[in-house]
Amino acid sequence: MTGQSSDDIHQAEVWTTIAPGYDAAIAPVMRPFAASLLDLLGLTAGTGSPMLLDVAAGTGAVALEAARRGADVLATDFAAGMVEVMRRQLAAEGLPGRAQVMDGQHLLVDDDSVDLGTSTFGLMYFPDPVAGLRELHRVLRPAGRVGIATWDLTRTGLPQLIAAALTHVDADLAAPPAPSWAWLCSPAGLKQALRQSGFTDIAVHEVTHHAALPDPADFFRQLPNWTPPLRPLFANLPPQSIDRAGEAFADVVRTHSTPEGLPQTALIGVARRAP
C-alpha cells in the first residue's frame, strides 16, 4: 500500500491477528451504528445500487449491511485479517461486494467514481484523518455523499468507563491521555474536519444505541485481545490488578446500564461533495 511506514505495516499485522476476536466481541457494538449511518445517507432497500466505498471497514459492519440493502460495495481496510473476515462473510451470505487491502489515506480508487463514502469508527484512528477525508472527497462523484462515525467523548461510554475502572483500582495510575483523535469526537470538531476536506451541506447527528455486555468483567480482561492500543497499558499491570479492574468495570457498567444495555453515543457526520 502506498506510503506505508514500518509502523503502519506493524499495526496492520497486529490488527490482522485480532480480527476474529474483534468480529466476535467489538463488531456487535458497531452494527447498530452502521445501520443508523446508512439510514442517514438514505440508503435503504429498493433505492437502487449506488457504488459505496467503506474505508477502514474493520470486519464489515457497514459493508455487509450496505450490501444487504442493494449497494455495490467496495470495502477496504489496511489489515489483511479484517479483509479476509469480510470476504468470508460476504460469501457466506451470498452478497455482492468486494473487500480489498488498502490504505485509507492513499486509496487505489479512481476520481469521481463513488456515490457514497463511509467510515465507521475507523478514519478517526488514521495518522492524518483529514487526509483520509480528502481521499473520500476525491473519489466521490459530484454531489456524492459521505457518512463518518466517531465516538462522542462528551458522553459516558466504553472509553470513559474503562479509564474509571483502572483508576478505581489504582488511584495513582494516570488516566490515559486523550487520544490524538479526540478532536474529531465533538460536533464542532467533526464539522471542522469535513469542511476542511472540501465537503458542504454538513450535518452532525448524535445517535445512541445500547450494547449488551453479558459478562463485563471478562469483556474488560479480554480488551487487549480486541483493541491493540490498550495493550501497552495492560502489559504494565499485574494480573491481580487487571482482575480487580475488571470487577470495577462490571460495577460501573451495571451502574450506567439500562434494561436495554449500556448506552453508547456516536456522532455521525453526513456531508456532500459539491455538484
Image (cartoon, rainbow, N blue to C red):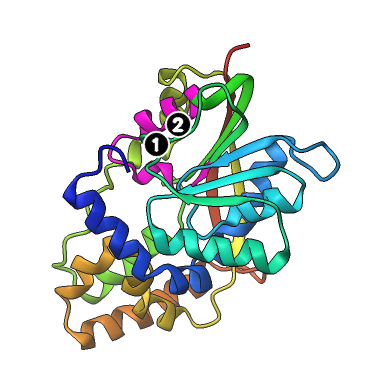
Q: Residues within 10 Å of mark 2 (few under 14, many from 20)?
A: many
- Residue 92: x %, y % from top left: 67, 69
Q: Quadrant of the N terminus?
A: top left
- Residue 183: x %, y % from top left: 34, 36
- Direction top: furthest residue: 275
Q: Which residues are the magenta region?
A: 119-138
Determine which residue is flagged by label 1. Answer: 184
- Residue 181: x %, y % from top left: 33, 41
Tell me: 255 left or right of 166. right
- Direction bottom: furthest residue: 240
Tell me: 109 left or right of 208. left
Give the SS element for disc 2.
helix
Which amino acid does the dot numbered 1 rest on? Leu
Determine which residue is flagged by label 2. Answer: 190
Quarter occupied by residue 144: top right
- Direction right: furthest residue: 46
